[in-house]
Image (tube, rainbow, N blue to C red):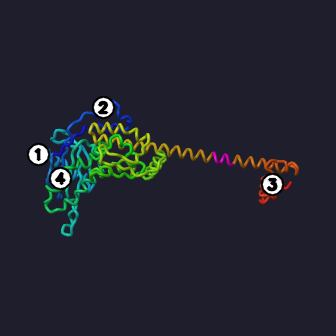
Amino acid sequence: MFTSQTSSFQESIDVEEKDDFDSEEISGYSQKIQLNCYYTIYLYQGTSLTLIDSSLPSEAEPELRTYISRRLSKGALLGGMGNIATVELSIPEQAVGCYCCLLEQERSPEQPDADGNGYVICFMGGSEKGLNLFRIELDKYVQGLHSSLQTPELQNLETEVRPYLSRWYEESVMHIYRVVQLVQNNISFLLHAALSHTHVEVINSDERTKTDTSRFIKAASLQGLSQQDTTTASLCKAISEETQSDLIIDCSTSPPTLTNTVSNRFCDGWIQAFLNAAERCNPFLLRQILENFKLKVGNIYADCSSVSKAGFCCWILFFFFFFYASMLQQLLDLIQFAEMTATEKHQFPFAPKFEQLWIITLSFPLCRNSSFFNK
């Protein structure tokens, strides 16, 4: 059984609409508890499930198998797509979040009808809401196991499969927590870099730290919202009023030294929220705060877009008003100029300009044939 220190996720997702994460309303998150994480892997053939390995207590595994069989019979597990729900098992937590994914075996010429055969991977820990925040990471982590499951009779169970399954929580959930713990008050620089598409380079560190930082930047960006992402990057660069250079994180010192740091008031305002969640050892709350950060950026973008559109419309109206008002004034001056005598025309301000305008006006057939312009 894999064990890690974390606080209870409880109802951290309820802070979605709150901007002040320091308020007493979430003081309950400060309590730390022992979070137990479990895994189970089954061989799925036809309609039967065969246990391969599990970290669940012996009395809880049959309960999980019954639950999985019921889900499979209803067609609720699709190949390669994780399913997250709350299950009640004979474990200390009783009700726990459960991620299940069916990895289908590749069909071979010898077994053309092997549809549905494969492995069912289950990860249990935290809550359903908490695991849903990391669905993408969990899907990707399970796919990373695919090549290891091609070994006949899983001869690599103890050397590859079991260690890989045991690390699911550390690798799929804890990366954001590790990054916040690493940079502490400098987290705003990473948030700004994520929004402004600034490249972040980590030097003098292990591969895990580099990977964690890259995943944090990706999670904090507005990836997938191409228009908002591009516009937000432009806004960040404009607000910072500085030429963007690569953000360098040098891990040769403790704490790490950051070079070419750029931030703004908006990103700085989220520092304390991240530090509070990290202090409570709550990776689920950290992820929720990160999602709230992106939601806030999206709202700001939407507001700016509305103002820009409204401002553009006002500018168009002002342009046409100014243009037609100017044309009307010139027409009135032209009429006044036409009724003047030669001496008055010579004394009239901007006479050369109106003489040219008069010639241009008479060049139009409609004006040439008009009795007014031929006085």
Q: Are marks 4 and 1 in contact (CB under 8 Å)?
A: no
Query: Which residue in the structure is indicated by mark 4?
Result: 163
Question: Mark 4: few, some, or many residues within 10 Å (few <14, many ≥20)?
Answer: few
Question: Mark 1: few, some, or many residues within 10 Å (few <14, many ≥20)?
Answer: few
Give me the disc on residue 355.
Answer: 3
Above or below, 148 relative to 229 = below
Q: Residue furthest left?
A: 58
Which of the pair 216/247 is nearer the observer? 247
Q: Residue furthest top?
A: 24
At label 4, the amino acid type is Pro
- Residue 258 lies, in percent from the top left, at 36, 46
Q: State which tag comes first along the sequence, 1 or 3.
A: 1
Tell me how far mark 2 sits from mark 4, CA to CA.
36 Å
Q: Residue furthest front?
A: 253
The answer to whether residue 24 is seen in the rendering is yes
Question: Mark 3: few, some, or many residues within 10 Å (few <14, many ≥20)?
Answer: some
Instruction: Determine if the magenta segment contains residue 320.
Output: yes
Q: Residue at x 82, y 56 (%)?
A: 370
Q: State which tag comes first along the sequence, 2 or 1.
A: 2
Q: State which tag comes first along the sequence, 2 or 4.
A: 2
Query: Which residue in the structure is indicated by mark 1?
Result: 58
At label 3, the amino acid type is Glu
Name which quarter of the figure residue 296 lies in. Answer: top left
- Residue 31 lies, in percent from the top left, at 25, 33
Q: State which tag comes first along the sequence, 4 or 1.
A: 1
